[in-house]
Amino acid sequence: MLSVTILCIGKLKEKYWREACEEYAKRLGAFCKFRIVEFSESRLPERPSDAQIAEALDMEGEKILEAAKGSFLIPLCIEGRELSSPKLAEGIQQATVGGASAISFAIGSSFGLSDGVKQSGNFCLSMSPMTFPHQLARVMLCEQVYRTFQIMNHGKYHK
């Protein structure tokens, strides 16, 4: 069974975001081994310098890359490709046909992801040219992963 992991910097503080992710995790259990792994966000001063931000992103990136080792990695970033839901499903399907048994999505902190994570990805994904809070992006990604499996399995969810 395919393993799908969402690697996140930071925790969901509000109960309603956690419940939304838990609902999609429950639904995804029929299709894959799904889990969300949270890493602590690096502590930065009130007004961090570019060098401090880069150092924090590198430290966070090391955690993500270690956890994603051996998986098909899809970092989420503004520079990534925008895909329709069917195209994302097609990309996941191609990855599995190509031998991927594990897929990891990476969501960075409010400062994003390190260049190392982006460059290590099999491809970078942008959810939209708009900016979303990281908590909402996580819920949206959970929903899109669920939609992907519905599309791949010809379910009625995606219309």
Image: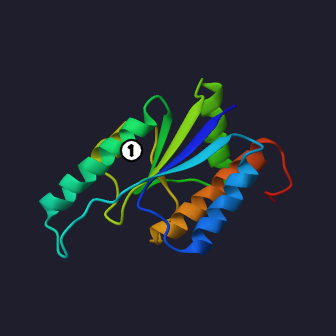
Residue farthest to the right? Answer: 156
Q: Residue at x 54, y 69 (%)?
A: 136
Q: Is residue 121 visible?
A: no
Q: Residue at x 41, y 61 (%)?
A: 10
* Residue hosting label 1: 64
Q: How many marks?
A: 1
Q: Nearer the viewer, residue 133 or 8?
A: 8
**Residue 14 horizontal/vertical position (percent):** 53, 74
Establish if 93 lies above or below 25: above
Q: Quadrant of the N terminus?
A: top right
Establish if 117 lies above or below 84: above
Which amino acid type is shown beneath numbered disc 1?
Ile
| Secondary structure at numbered mark 1 | helix
Q: Nearer the viewer, residue 110 or 67?
A: 67
Q: Name the image colouring.
A: rainbow
**Residue 29 horizontal/vertical position (percent):** 73, 45
Please state if 48 lies on the left or on the right of 67 as rendered: left
Q: Residue at x 78, y 44 (%)?
A: 30
**Residue 110 horizontal/vertical position (percent):** 35, 66
Q: Residue at x 69, y 48 (%)?
A: 148
Q: Is residue 109 visible?
A: yes
Residue farthest to the top? Answer: 99
Q: Quadrant of the C terminus?
A: bottom right
